[in-house]
Amino acid sequence: MPRKGPVPKRDVLPDPMYNSKLVTRLINQIMVDGKRGKAQKILYKAFELVQERSGNDAMETFEQALKNVMPVLEVRARRVGGSNYQVPVEVRPERRQALGLRWVVNYSRLRGEKTM
């Protein structure tokens, strides 16, 4: 905990193609070793594939997929009288989005195929 008050959140710039901060955050999750250009190519190619195969807008499909993945509740450990209880707590919107993005990227990496 800093003594000078809460640390301000750094705002990300929207990406050049879709003009979306959400896409920038996804690119940052995909990025490994600072290779932003490579991460952008991977994501934009994946969005093109989604658009070709489904015929729907790639951004709408991505936003819907993220909504489906984002958690509403999580359990937190609560110590009461010497024993720990798992108490369900509602997830903050920022954390909900961060967890959803992280899960999408992690499970897409675990797939058997080499493509995104």
Image (tube, rainbow, N blue to C red):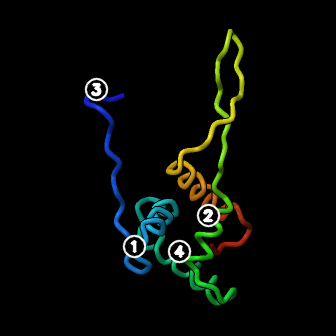
Q: Image point 59% across, 78% down: which residue? A: 46
Q: Image point 69% across, 86% down: which residue? A: 54
Q: Secondary structure at mark 2?
A: helix
Question: What's the distance in space between the residues labelled 4 and 3, CA to CA?
Answer: 40 Å
* Callouts 1 and 4 close, C-beta under 8 Å: no
Residue on which disc 3 sits: 3
Q: Secondary structure at mark 1?
A: loop
Badge 4 amino acid: Leu
Q: Image point 33% across, 52% down: which residue? A: 10
Q: Residue 39, percent across and down?
A: 48, 70
Residue 86 falls in which quadrant of the image? top right
Q: Earlier in the sequence, mark 1 or mark 4?
A: 1
In this rendering, is residue 17 above or below 82? below
Q: Residue 23, percent across and down?
A: 48, 69
Disc number lying in front (4 or 2): 2
Q: Earlier in the sequence, mark 3 or mark 2?
A: 3
Question: What's the distance in space between the residues labelled 1 and 4, CA to CA?
Answer: 11 Å
* Callouts 3 and 2 close, C-beta under 8 Å: no
Q: Earlier in the sequence, mark 4 or mark 2?
A: 4
Question: What's the distance in space between the residues labelled 3 and 2, CA to CA?
Answer: 36 Å
Residue on which disc 4 sits: 43
* Callouts 4 and 2 close, C-beta under 8 Å: no
Tell me if 58 is positioned left or right of 40 in this view.
right
Question: What's the distance in space between the residues labelled 4 and 2, CA to CA?
Answer: 15 Å
Q: Which mark is residue 15?
A: 1
Badge 1 amino acid: Asp
Residue on which disc 2 sits: 66
Return the residue nearer the eye: 28 or 54: 54
Check the picture and name the quadrant holding the C terminus.
bottom right
Check the picture and name the quadrant holding the N terminus.
top left
Badge 2 amino acid: Leu
